[in-house]
Amino acid sequence: MSQLYDCRDAFAQALEEAARNDPRIVVVINDSLGSSKLKGFKAAFPQRLVNVGIAEQNMVGVAAGLANGGKVPFVSGASPFLTARALEQIKVDLAYSQANVKLCGMSSGLAYGELGPTHHSIEDLAWTRAIANLTVVVPADPLETAQAVHEAARLSGPFFLRISRMPVPQVHPADYRFRLGKASWLRQGSDITLIATGVMVARALEAAALLANDGIEAAVINMATIRPLDREAVVEAARRSGAIVTVEEHTIYGGLGGAVAEAVVTTYPVPMRILGVPGVFAPTGSPEYLLEHFGLTPAGIRAAALELLKARAEQ
Amino acid sequence: MTPDREDQLAALRKKANLLRQRDLVMIQRAGIGHIGGDFSALDILVTLYFAVLRVDPQHPDAPDRDRFILSKGHCAGALYNTIAEVGFFPTSELETFMKPLSRLNGHPDRTKVPGVEASTGPLGHGLPVGVGAALAARLDGAPWRTYVLTGDGELQEGSNWEAAMAAAHYGLDNLTVIVDRNRLQQGAPTEDTIRLEPLADKWRAFGWAVREVDGHDHAALLHMLQSESWEAGRPRCLIAYTHKGQGVSFMCDNVDWHHRVPTPEEAERALQELREAVHG
């Protein structure tokens, strides 16, 4: 098995690098120093780390004010609380105001498995994706995470970076360059396309390998930018393969699947399957257990792809 | 009081009265607006913009400007009238207030209106943003100050108290919150809705330096806002006792005027009262 990484390490390291190059960068946290892995940042830049305590609405408002004062704040906290509790502040103080603030939703998706549905962040893409002006990015591996941090620091405007704590392998080659709003094609194939995001990208690649054993060539796309979505890549996938399966550790309503489906039905309609959490609160269990429970495994993705191809053949 | 000071205060009174008249005409023309809260806040806004804030309408984004944040965003009308008079945009544009495609939305938009520091509307947003701005100045060792005007009913939003805690923790004595204490919220008195008193004690308990003032007394407002007597290391809270609908007898302290639009007859009566007040 290939080496696994916690993307928070890449996040923290990249943020320190960015902060060394740009004195405007500050961090705002809600008592989340450890869970954001920012102890190193605090040691390197003690004056540039603002801990507002357990107060998410204030955290996002403070970041907007810091941006008004010329700073580039990175706001880091557990994604369920950052996005839900401060949603109006995200909409008004950041997105509507075009504030130069970078939200970093940690431990998103099902990463807090055992802690229960209060701590699962399986709606954050739907919430953030619905807000105008807000860029939404979900990196798939440590390389992409680091590059997304640097891109967020470089670009002016509100940005949401969704970061997991579930271990993932490196899915991109060392010379990969993340481009905002551009999907990356990790595998070519003309029978079906798997479009995945975040921690599911590696699993989609494994599913494609299983499908190859079945004689089915599946393309795999890493859709790291959820908004603005790479509609061209979606259309190309639809044209080339005629069938799309999306995979995310997020509710099936309003996330990657919703975004891709919106693009598909308005450009080049083809049959789709949307894999994710099917509109329920997840039970308690480890992240791996929950992914298994919802079929978000290589085997589960393979099964969905086969079912879709069978249904299409019968049409 | 020096003659200069007396002239300054007379000018502020005159300016506030003029802006009340313009605001009234603007709201009547638009057929929508929040006249009661506009009138309770106008003396505070005029004092800030014409005597306290270091802002330059020619350079609205100058890094060292003072920041003013209108947290009670529904009183955009009072802010627009004030900053137009300062010169951030032509006063003639007030005629477009809340008209289709006007940038003078019913709540201020920082991306469109020069001089607006924060897009507000939903209550309880201004103080957290003010805390962030004050922190930015602190980080840079910059001398500019941040002022936030909140409504009183709006203090029922918990986000204010999150921000109040943080401001005191960080010792932000470059931050001043002014509470427009008109004692009325949309539908009823604050004390009949969710009680705020003892309000000064609450701010003190949160670690703030607190002063109380007649929010329609320009001399008192100016004295407090320019005073050097505030405790060092504490954020400042100025509770300004005001009257909703101040300046017009039949609007004053009347909850109905939170967002009622005057009829032509009421508008004429109100304008008459305001004109007499400035000449009398």
Image: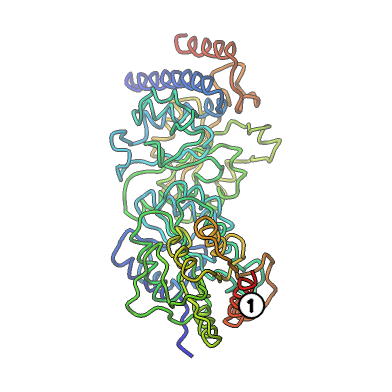
Q: Is residue A206 above or below residue B57?
A: below
Name the residue located 46 percent from the left edge and 72 percent from the top edge.
Answer: A221
- Looking at the picture, tell me which residue is in the foreground, A298 or A131: A298
Colouring rule applied to residues: rainbow
Q: Quadrant of residue B48?
A: top left
Which residue corresponds to mark 1?
Answer: A295
Quadrant position of the C terminus of chain A in the picture: bottom right
Name the residue located 70 percent from the left edge and 73 percent from the top edge.
Answer: A283
Q: Position of residue A17 (x, y in %)?
A: 33, 70
- Looking at the picture, tell me which residue is in the foreground, A200 or A204: A204
Q: Looking at the image, can residue A35 be seen?
A: no
Left or right: where does residue B202 sit relative to residue A268? Answer: right
Q: Is residue B45 above or below residue A147?
A: above
Q: Residues within 10 Å of mark 1 (few under 14, many from 20)?
A: some
Name the residue located 47 percent from the left edge and 8 percent from the top edge.
Answer: B280
- Looking at the picture, tell me which residue is in the foreground, B208 or B256: B256
Callout 1: chain: A
Q: Position of residue A82 (x, y in %)?
A: 54, 60
Q: Position of residue A74 (x, y in %)?
A: 42, 61
Q: Looking at the image, can residue A53 be seen?
A: yes
Q: How many marks?
A: 1
Secondary structure at badge 1 equals loop
| Residue positioned most to the bottom | A1
Q: Position of residue A196 (x, y in %)?
A: 51, 71
Q: Is residue B139 above or below residue B50?
A: below
The amino acid type of the residue labelled 1 equals: Gly
Q: Quadrant of residue A45?
A: bottom left
Q: Is residue A175 above or below residue B161?
A: below
